[in-house]
């Protein structure tokens, strides 16, 4: 929105997109794919696919450009060696961790206002 928080969530609310992109890599005949290919297979917009690929280096790695200038991505070695259940657990764990961070930040803001009201209240 206004980018007030210097924190961006990479997994929270994006689990299904990441799992769809992971499945696209698993089902692809080629090991490396261009973001447009992933967008066509998954139905996710190209901009969102590019953001997810760049934001999650735990899952996807950017390959060096080919001589024709095409940048491709592939699954990391660790991700490709894991089973599908382990990858789902990794994504869900990241989302859970980010969810806890969001709730903790909200609780801190709420407690800040409560403390301010308690301190200012007697002066009114």
Image (spheres, helix red, strand yellow):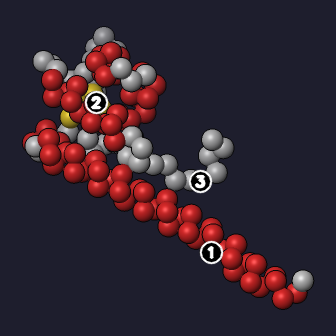
- The residue labelled by disc 2 is 21
Pick out the residue farthest to the bottom. Answer: 122
Q: With 75 as the anchor, is 101 left or right in this view?
A: right
Can residue 73 be seen by looking at this rendering?
A: yes
- The residue labelled by disc 1 is 111
Q: Are marks 1 and 2 in contact (CB under 8 Å)?
A: no
Q: Find numbered disc 1 in the image and state the secondary structure of the residue it sits on.
A: helix
Is residue 6 placed above or below 38 in the rendered structure? below
Can residue 70 be seen by looking at this rendering?
A: no
Which residue is pictured at 39% across the width and 40% down the height? 14
Label 1: how many residues lie within 10 Å, few (<14), some (14-19) or many (20+)? Answer: few
Which residue is pictured at 26% across the width and 41% down the height? 59
Reading the chain from its start, which is encountered first: label 3 or label 2? 3
Q: CA distance from mark 1 to mark 3?
A: 18 Å
Picture coordinates of residue 97, whole percent (x, y): 37, 59
Q: Find numbered disc 3 in the image and state the secondary structure of the residue it sits on.
A: loop
Numbered tag placed on residue 96 in the rendering = none
- The residue labelled by disc 3 is 5
Q: Find numbered disc 2 in the image and state the secondary structure of the residue it sits on.
A: helix
Q: CA distance from mark 1 to mark 2?
A: 39 Å
Label 2: how many residues lie within 10 Å, few (<14), some (14-19) or many (20+)? Answer: many
Pick out the residue farthest to the right. Answer: 124
Reading the chain from its start, which is encountered first: label 1 or label 3? 3
Q: Quadrant of residue 46?
A: top left
Picture coordinates of residue 109, whole percent (x, y): 62, 67
Which residue is pictured at 84% across the width and 88% down the height? 122
């Amino acid at each position: 929105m206004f980018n007030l928080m210097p924190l961006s969530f990479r997994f929270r609310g994006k689990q299904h997109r990441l799992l769809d992109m992971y499945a696209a890599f698993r089902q692809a005949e080629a090991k490396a794919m261009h973001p447009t290919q992933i967008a066509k297979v998954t139905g996710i917009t190209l901009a969102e696919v590019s953001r997810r690929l760049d934001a999650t280096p735990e899952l996807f790695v950017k390959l060096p450009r080919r001589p024709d200038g095409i940048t491709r991505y592939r699954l990391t070695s660790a991700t490709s060696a894991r089973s599908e259940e382990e990858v789902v657990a990794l994504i869900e764990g990241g989302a859970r961790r980010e969810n806890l961070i969001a709730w903790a930040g909200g609780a801190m803001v709420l407690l800040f206002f409560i403390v301010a009201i308690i301190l200012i209240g007697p002066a009114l």
